[in-house]
Image: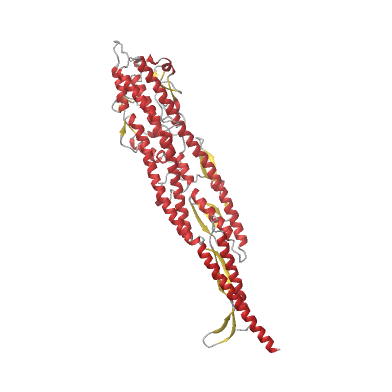
Amino acid sequence: MPLMGSIYVGSSGLQTSSNSLNTAAHNLANIETAGYTRQQILQGNKFYNKIGIASVSDMQVGIGVDYTKCRQVRDAFLDASYRKENGRSSFYEICSESTSEIETLLGEMEGASFKDSLAKLWTSVQELQKDPSSSVTQGVFVSTCAQFLERASAVSKGLNEYQLNLDSRVSSMVEDINTKTDRLFQLNNLIQKNEIGVEEANDYRDERNYILDQLSKLINIKTVENINGGVEVYAEGSPLLIGDSVNHLEVLKDENGFSKVTWGSLYNHQEVFNFHQPVASEFNTDIGELKALLMARGDHKANYSDLQKGTTQEEIFDYYNYGTKDENDIPIASSIVMNAQGEFDRLIHNIVTSINNVICGNTPDESKATGIEIFERLGTDRYEDGKYVKENTDNSPSDVSTMYTVSNIRVNPDLLKQPTLNSFIKDDKSVDFEKATKLVEVFAGTADVRDLNKDTETWINSAWTINPNVSSKYGYVAFYDGVVGSIANIGSVYNSIVSSQQVTVDSLENSRQQVLGVSSEEELQNIIKFQNAYNASSRYINVINDMLETIINTMQ
């Protein structure tokens, strides 16, 4: 190799060692930066000089090392696995949070427990059985009915307000997704512009990967990097960001006033989620906070009628678990809030109608009524023109005018003024102990009561199931414990899944950090290595310089 060519070998060593030192220092400086990916200098051979031809090979001499690329050290498989499991963990965190909130609402409201009001009502019924003719026990009974309804209304209001709170979070989350998508689009353009030459836009890539990690918590995404360095993002199987096209999510209000998430006009405002798919890890249908929020919230304010829609048990079961044929409606069983609303309202409805039916003689004929109903409907009187007005549970849940639901009942104001209007005295002046006993049996779930919603006389047991998926029947005292216990069991399952998912996510993140994370010890070792390489190249150049100087001086 010509002596002058040896200078290139030394200078290339200086340059690449200097670049490697700068990269190691850059890694150390960003060791605490969120989303930063470790960078690494790749080196390769410079072009070879051909100095002759031999019989076995070309006679070539290298002229040093060359800077090839400053790459990010990442693993695409680990990134995809982490984002999927991170989204799944976020899904169940929302479910766990929702069940915890429902437990709180059912357990305590403003320091007064609903269960206490239910226990007091049960106690007043038992006291009424002892002496039905007493004006004191009748007054206490009516008073506890009013307190019971007040606490029930407070719990129902709390459930409705929490549902609205979830709805407001949907809108803000969609806005966040759109903002992140817009930034990804900008970063794609910046990366492509900066990487037209030999330079790598690694800092922009770091920000893009960090946003993708955050986006994976909100919605189920898949990503593909195209040949130009831009990333394509698919959300729930549809393009969210592809090429120069950004497809924003939109929030529209449905007929019940709740937010539904749709694609933009490009997809004719088609709804993003299909809620009739089974929620399971094997189908990847349990990923993303947005879907979890929508499912927890539901699509309307549920009441007891949602737990008994249909004429056969099979129809009731199907509606509760699968909803209507519309794939975008949310089944009651899939919604934590709607299920709690329906079960709680079913308890209130059963207690209210059972008390009324016992007091009024279990008859649709006003002329045979033996008392005044304690709980009356706000929209429609129990009797109109001498005829009993049957509850119409086939109407939409928002039309509750004929229903004995929490939002449509009150304690009869006449009884609040004069509790003894229901005298519990028979025509023969004897005390009606049978009616009082019937009230006790109704609460205990041992009485047979007439179902006035049937066109013919139908007698049913006053014990009820919590929902169509539960076979056990409860009296009203145990019914509430069953509702709370059912939600607590669901919450326990969700908490267990969250804990398991967190282990999975942490494990994947640890594996990722082993690849992309910065190790201060490793980078310090690299600095020492590249510093020594730099010094070696410097000494090499000094030797070549001395040799050249000696040759030139000798030739003079």
Residue 409 left/right relative to 66: left
The answer, for residue 204, to whether it is visible in the render is: yes
39 to 266, vertically: above or below: below
Give me the residue at 38% from left, 19% from top: 140
Q: Position of residue 36 (x, y in %)?
A: 54, 58
Q: Residue at x 44, y 40 (%)?
A: 98
Image quadrant holding the C terminus, namely bottom right
The way the protein has been coloured in the rendering is: secondary structure
* Image quarter of residue 361: top left
* Furthest-right residue in this view: 556
Name above or below for residue 346 compared with residue 383. below
| Closer to us: 150 or 22 | 22
Q: Which residue appears farthest toward the top when viewing the image? A: 428
Q: Nearer the viewer, residue 82 or 119?
A: 119
- Closer-to-camera residue (147/17): 17
**Residue 4 can be seen in this image:** no
Where does residue 379 sit, x and y in percent of width and height?
A: 46, 23
Residue at the spot x=39%, y=24% of the render?
Answer: 390
- Which is more toward the observer, 526 or 126? 526
Relative image position of residue 242 (x, y in whole percent): 55, 55
Residue 486 screen position, x and y as percent: 36, 38
For the N terminus, the quadrant is bottom right
